[in-house]
Image (cartoon, grey):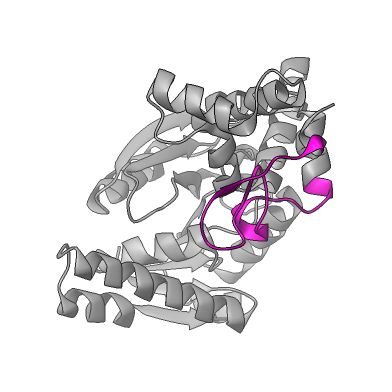
Amino acid sequence: MKKVAVIGAGTMGNGIAHVFAQTGYEVSLIDIAQTSLDKGIATITKNLDRQLKKEKITEEDKTKTLANITTYTQIVEGVKGVELVVEAATENVDLKLKIFKDLSEATPENVILASNTSSISITKIAAVTNRPDKVIGMHFMNPVPVMKLVEVIRGYATSDEVTTLIMDLSKNLGKVPVEVNDYPGFVANRILMPMINEAIITLFEGVAGVEEIDTVMKLGMAHPMGPLQLADFIGLDVCLSIMNVLYEGFGNPKYAPCPLLVNMVTAGKLGVKSGEGFYSWTHGTKELIVADSFKK
């Protein structure tokens, strides 16, 4: 495999493109907006400069990595000649189903179609394609160039051959793949998101404040950052979307999203991406917000 396409130039998409390109693959980075593509390339360049400063790569490595990426605004053009497509669009089931239906029509049946979804059923995604045996999940962690884990999710029809190939490919990228089966939230978010939701409930019920909750989890449980700060980084809209998938998928009240999370997303308080969540990020650094809206 030499040529891959990545759908979506956002945080996850540009990170995935970065890793593939740095490993020597030809990458087609596809997004409907040229501004998003330009921003994605700028982010990749900035991250390469960071690696260069830390002497993890050379100037030649940076040049080769950027040269391996070509941008496109049309799926049909971007997927020509590729052997693998990794979709990294917004975590919206209708959008993903449309993209995979389009990919099914735009690529030969031997092309593997992978999704970076963090919670949506691979089996459901595969059902809209003409090759469910070649549809698989590749759930990278953020930031992609740094984090080692890739959850490799088998759909109901995913073949052994495709699973083995993607496991080996992930290792070739310098990642550690873990094979999991297709159930809501897979492993990572089935465990992580209820914890984050419980931290929000703890805040909502007035048990403790934002900083106190995060401090308990950092110092008491050795987490690198607290659950509320992590939620801000993930995006509160993404957290809500995943909790809804878990709630709908299992039908268990324990997965119901906290009303505070729902209200914050409705109000546009999405975390780092909007400049405000449980913390204020408007000045580029974390500042604690003290607000009555965090309470019942």
Residue displayed at 76% across by 40% down: 291
- Residue occupying the far front of the picture: 290
Residue 61, horizontal then vertical, whole percent: 19, 74
Is residue 252 something one can see in this rendering?
Answer: no
Main SS class of the magenta portion in the image: loop
Residue displayed at 60% across by 81% down: 35
Is residue 283 something one can see in this rendering?
Answer: yes
Is 168 rendered above or below residue 72? above
Numbered circles on residues, count: 0
- Asked if residue 10 is among those painted magenta in the image, a careful observer would answer no
Could you tell whether 284 is left or right of 270 in the image? left
Magenta region, residue range: 265-292
- Asked if residue 274 is among those painted magenta in the image, a careful observer would answer yes
Residue 37, horizontal then vertical, whole percent: 53, 78
Nearest the camera: 267 or 290? 290
Residue displayed at 53% across by 51% down: 286
Is 108 rendered above or below residue 264? below
Quadrant containing the N terminus is bottom left
Residue 216, horizontal then vertical, whole percent: 49, 22
Residue 280, horizontal then vertical, whole percent: 63, 52
Nearest the camera: 152 or 198? 198
Could you tell whether 131 is left or right of 217 in the image? right
Nearest the camera: 61 or 24? 61
- Res. 205 image quadrant: top right
Quadrant containing the C terminus is top right
Could you tell whether 8 is left or right of 168 in the image? right
Nearest the camera: 121 or 43? 43
Residue displayed at 71% across by 41% down: 241
Is 47 rendered above or below residue 37? above
